[in-house]
Amino acid sequence: MYTTKKPYIIGIGGGSASGKSTVAKAIINKIGLNNIAYICHDSYYRDISEFDDNAIINYDHPNSLDTKLMVSDLIKLINGNVIHIPEYDYITHRRLSQTTEINLRPIILIEGILIYNDINIRKLCNMKIYVDTEADERLIRRINRDMTTRKRTIEDIIYQYTSFVKPMHNQFVEPTKNYADIIIPSGYNEASISMVVSSLEHLINH
């Protein structure tokens, strides 16, 4: 277990389908999983059973996520404890019985559209990255992703986007760009990734 010094915490925020996961994977591939503990905010979606039976659930609102649990897990991990983060099924909107074990590493990388909406997460982050991608591009990516991996119809995707994703992005996500230390344009930028990786390599080697 990594216990020699306090871990360096990186946040990756940005809109839905902006390219956050692509940026995270690029960093992980260059730095190595043995150096990074990766935690996605999406893992902390609340189980559908926590909502009223007749409620229209807004999955793009901060209340749809158990951010308090995520912060608690982060603090435990920072203090050297093994944590077990939830696994979430996007098709049934339920948490699975199994969890994912995460051990402390020199770097903790957290990702999610709403991570910077929470002041506690912002305070924990040593580096805050925001992936800034135009709305049209994000919608196209979301359609491709949700039809392919989440088995949703184009009608459902468009309804969810116009009713929830877009207004919640404007209200809760876009404003958090002001908290970012680094803004990566167009979903991926090699120069920005190289700069981040260089900084992290320096931290690991010193």
Image (cartoon, rainbow, N blue to C red):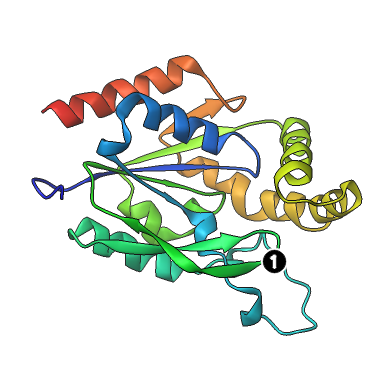
Q: Residue 123 at what x, y percent from top left?
A: 33, 54
Instruction: Check the image and report above or below for 42 versus 185.
Output: below
User: Quick one: quadrant of the C terminus?
Assistant: top left
Q: Amino acid at mark 1?
A: Thr
Residue 126 lies left or right of residue 162; in this view the side is left
Q: Residue 106 at what x, y percent from top left?
A: 21, 41
Q: Quadrant of residue 172?
A: bottom right
Q: Residues within 10 Å of mark 1 (few under 14, many from 20)?
A: few
Q: Residue at x 83, y 57 (%)?
A: 163
Q: Residue at x 23, y 56 (%)?
A: 78
Residue 49 lies left or right of residue 42; in this view the side is right
Residue 101 lies left or right of residue 117; in this view the side is left
Instruction: Check the image and report above or below for 18 versus 166.
Output: above
Q: Residue at x 32, y 37 (%)?
A: 33
Q: Residue 87 at what x, y percent from top left?
A: 50, 61
Instruction: Identify the residue under disc 1.
Output: 92
Q: Residue 132 at what x, y percent from top left?
A: 59, 32
Element under disc 1? loop
Give the number of marks: 1
Q: Residue furthest right?
A: 155
Return the residue nearer the eye: 51 or 173. 51
Q: Residue at x 29, y 20 (%)?
A: 198
Q: Residue furthest front?
A: 98
Residue 25 lies left or right of residue 33; in this view the side is right
Q: Residue furthest left?
A: 4
